[in-house]
């Protein structure tokens, strides 16, 4: 019996997936559990495994196309098995119901293909179905313009392509679909977006002009012509969409408060240098020391290593530290599990490995979901101080600034020390001001005297 390959849920926040690469082609033998394709989710590129054995008989979405969770994307069966019924059902699902009146059909496309945040596409798809020079009939074949009044005439647009077109202001009537049955897919819209970008400087000169005339009558003042800036719109990635959704659920609903302190960093810097000289393979960074010290401090202040869970406050037994890593599409937070139980060398090696795989989008969901506390370090960018937004349901996040040499007073004398400012963002539903302050006191004490780590 044929196996239906559907778009799987590969991360907890995934709503649709983009087919990055097929690892098998039609006609190839497939074994259960064997990698079948690579899927781009909102967080990472992950392998999809085959849930049946046989031959990959039919690929229903191409590389670069997206599909919502549960959509049929391929068929596995025996070499001589009849899969025509499944293929027909899949085609019907992509082309929609040929018996649906045009008004209902266009509304159906918009509802199924787009999130609520892109309502304009409903009218665009309906208009395209009526006015396009070449439309797609219910049988999936390109028909000439004289069929535009037929009850089944319409454009077929993939969900991702429709959203990209709406966000980039592209008229779907100008797009020639290269997908199955003339379906407009991501690559078709990307081509027009690229053309629009290259033409932006030229089109910018045609933008509406306004005139600002100097006031006051001075002979040295001249009338100034102001021209609206040219611009470009770029579709956001699945990762950026997820970041946007999560931030909306953080800074608004979560009552933040912020605590800042300044820390003398000469001793941890000296310890890092000495350890790396003893064993160059360690490659310990200041951030690795901060991760370790944070974990130790959390074990002494369990109220900070906690999260608000509607009816309960959840206290964690170990410090699973999320370390923010900037990647091309946004920000991801790989997790050092049980950092309180690991040595500095183990933490350094793990952070390097996680950061590298995060940049290559190779993290597994359990490696970036479920931290108990997070650290965001912008010191390497020369940022002295900032506040970070809590990543729900975590109860706090530590923002780390740059180390810099500053004059400070020690024993009534002015001396130069390496100083660093950190800011703790707290969820006031879980952490009170005094609780957060005591945590920072302990954090500062250990970091300024790192020998406490071996006590």
Image (spheres, rainbow, N blue to C red):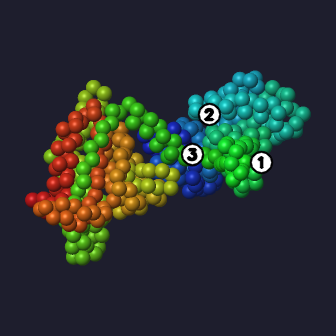
The image shows residue 5 at horizontal and vertical percentages of 55, 43
Q: Residue furthest left?
A: 455
Q: Secondary structure at mark 1?
A: loop
Identify the mark nearer the N-term, 2 or 1: 2
**Nearer the N terminus, badge 2 or badge 3?**
2
How many C-alpha atoms fall within 10 Å of the one at disc 3: few (<14), some, or many (≥20)?
few
Judge whether 83 appears above or below 289 on screen.
above
How far is disc 3 from disc 1 in space, using C-alphas? 27 Å
**First of labels 3, 1 by sequence position:** 1
Please give left or right for residue 238 compared with residue 312 in the image.
right
Q: Farthest residue in the front direction?
A: 218
Spot occupied by residue 117 in the image (x, y as percentages of width and height): 58, 32
Query: Can residue 82 be spotted in the picture?
Result: no
Q: Which mark is residue 263?
A: none
Image location of residue 384, percent across then percent down: 35, 56
User: In this image, 269 relative to 219: left or right?
Assistant: left
Q: Are the residues flagged by discs 2 and 1 in contact, CB closer than 8 Å?
A: no
Disc on res. 206: 1
Residue lying at 38% horizontally and 31% vertically, measured from the top left: 253
For the residue pair 198 and 331, the one nearer the viewer reads as 198
Residue at mark 2: 118
Residue nearest the viewer, comparing 30 with 264: 264
Quadrant containing the C terminus is bottom left
Callout 1: 10 Å neighbours few (<14), some, many (20+)?
few
Q: Secondary structure at mark 3?
A: loop
Q: Place residue 173 in its image quadrant.
A: top right
Mark 3 or mark 1, whichever is nearer to me: 1
Q: Residue at x 35, y 63 (%)?
A: 352
One can see residue 238 in this view:
yes
Q: Quadrant of the N terminus?
A: top right
Marks 2 and 3, how far apart in space?
13 Å
């Amino acid at each position: 019996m044929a196996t239906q390959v559907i778009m799987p849920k590969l991360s907890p926040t995934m709503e649709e997936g983009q087919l990055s690469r097929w690892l098998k082609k039609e006609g190839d033998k497939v074994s259960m559990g064997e990698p079948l394709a690579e899927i781009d989710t909102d967080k990472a590129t992950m392998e999809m495994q085959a849930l049946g054995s046989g031959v990959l008989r039919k690929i229903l979405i191409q590389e670069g196309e997206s599909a919502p969770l549960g959509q049929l994307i391929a068929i596995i069966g025996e070499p001589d098995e009849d899969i025509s019924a499944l293929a027909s059902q899949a085609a019907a699902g992509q082309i929609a119901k040929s018996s649906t009146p045009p008004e209902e059909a266009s509304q159906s496309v918009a509802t199924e293909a787009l999130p609520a945040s892109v309502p304009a596409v409903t009218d665009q798809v309906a208009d395209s179905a009526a006015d396009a020079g070449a439309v797609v009939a219910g049988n999936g074949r390109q028909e000439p313009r004289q069929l535009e009044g037929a009850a089944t005439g319409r454009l077929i647009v993939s969900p991702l392509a429709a959203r990209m077109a709406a966000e980039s202001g592209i008229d779907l009537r100008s797009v020639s679909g290269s997908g199955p049955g003339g379906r407009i897919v991501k690559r078709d819209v990307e081509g027009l977006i690229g053309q629009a970008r290259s033409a932006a400087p030229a089109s910018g000169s045609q933008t509406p002009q306004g005139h600002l005339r100097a006031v006051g009558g001075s002979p040295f003042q001249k009338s100034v012509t102001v021209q609206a800036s040219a611009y470009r719109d770029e579709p956001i990635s699945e990762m950026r969409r997820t970041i946007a959704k999560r931030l909306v659920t953080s800074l608004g609903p979560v009552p933040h408060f912020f605590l800042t302190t300044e820390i003398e960093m000469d001793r941890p810097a000296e310890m890092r240098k000495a350890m790396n000289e003893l064993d160059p393979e360690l490659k310990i960074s200041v951030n690795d020391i901060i991760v370790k010290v944070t974990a130790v401090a959390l074990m002494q202040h369990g109220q900070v290593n906690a999260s608000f869970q509607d009816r309960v406050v959840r206290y964690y037994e170990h410090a699973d530290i999320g370390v923010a890593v900037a990647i091309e599409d946004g920000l991801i937070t790989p997790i050092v599990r049980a950092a309180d139980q690991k040595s500095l060398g183990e933490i350094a090696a793990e952070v390097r490995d996680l950061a590298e795989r995060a940049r290559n989008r190779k993290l597994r969901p359990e490696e970036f979901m479920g931290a108990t506390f997070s650290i965001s370090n912008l010191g390497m960018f020369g940022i002295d101080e900032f506040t970070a937004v809590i990543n729900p349901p975590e109860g706090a996040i530590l923002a780390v600034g740059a180390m810099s040499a500053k004059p400070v007073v020690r024993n009534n004398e002015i001396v130069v020390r390496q100083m660093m400012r950190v800011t703790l963002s707290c969820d006031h539903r879980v952490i009170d001001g005094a609780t957060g302050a005591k945590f920072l006191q302990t954090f500062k004490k250990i970091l300024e005297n790192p020998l406490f780590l071996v006590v």
